[in-house]
Image (spheres, helix red, strand yellow):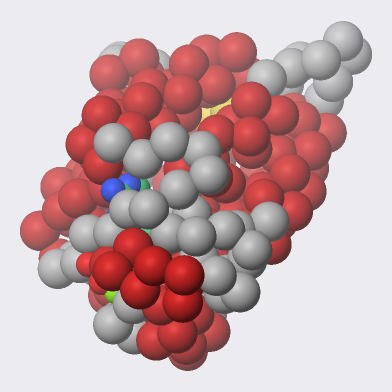
Amino acid sequence: MDAISSTHIERWLRDCANVFPAHKDELNELDAAIGDGDHGANMARGFAAIPSKLDALAGKEIDGLFRTTATTLISVVGGASGPLYGTFFLKAAAPAKGKLKLTLPEFCTCLDAGLAGIVGLGKAVVGDKTMVDVLTPALAALHPKNGDSLTGALERAVTTAREAAEATIPLLARKGRASYLGERSIGHKDPGATSSALLLEALLGAVQG
Ligand code: ADP
Ligand code: MG
């Protein structure tokens, strides 16, 4: 099994500075339907601020890349998603301490810790129509199966994430701004679920090179 390197992680985080601005309008529109229309702008602003912060960290340990991403998202993004994604990267940093490379099981430990951080902060459970609805099954799918390659596992996680984002459409929102709409939140895809799928797609792209 090939490993995830610090270079992969740096490429992933830098690529997000292109991916989220490219999907800004789409995410804003999803958020306009059930929230306040700023999720695309929040994600674009947050991730656009990251590359310049990573310049001093090229080739450095993975925990530092994650921690810098976390503090940047928390300080730059005003919405609920800033602290939530910030906590994801902050908690993912701890198991990566001092590491330049992670095996897939080690990487899963990091991302699972990140998701636990999101759940600890936001208290959402699967079915509440949030990013947790995507991250929970997608990170479960990332765990290695027999004979998996790294990209095979990532492809499975991305497919799962895309399906899980679509599956938020019929749900009633129980957390965040969308929950204020009650029944009117039904029939719309959750913006944070969609950005989580994009985050994992960017990871696959970065590992594929
Ligand atoms: P805000 O709601 O403050 O405008 P954003 O629009 O950036 O923030 O983010 C909205 C997204 O955040 C939602 O689509 C949802 O996926 C996610 N979210 C909101 N509250 C929670 C929560 N308590 N737990 C997990 N995710 C949440
Ligand atoms: Mg919003």
Identify whether 105 is placed above or below 108: above
Q: Residue furthest front?
A: 183
Residue 61 locus on image (x, y percent): 33, 27
The residue at 28%/59% (across/down) is 176
Residue 33 locus on image (x, y percent): 45, 85
The residue at 34%/85% (across/down) is 37
Looking at the picture, tell me which residue is in the foreground, 209 or 175: 175
The residue at 34%/63% (across/down) is 179
Residue 173 picture quarter: bottom left
Identify whether 29 is placed above or below 91: below
Q: Quadrant of ligand 1?
A: bottom left
Q: Residue furthest right?
A: 147
Residue 117 locus on image (x, y percent): 29, 30
Identify whether 97 is placed above or below 124: above
Identify whether 45 is placed above or below 56: below
The residue at 71%/29% (across/down) is 141
> Is residue 44 left or right of 137 when viewed as pictured?
left
Residue 24 locus on image (x, y percent): 45, 83
Looking at the picture, tell me which residue is in the foreground, 149 or 6: 149
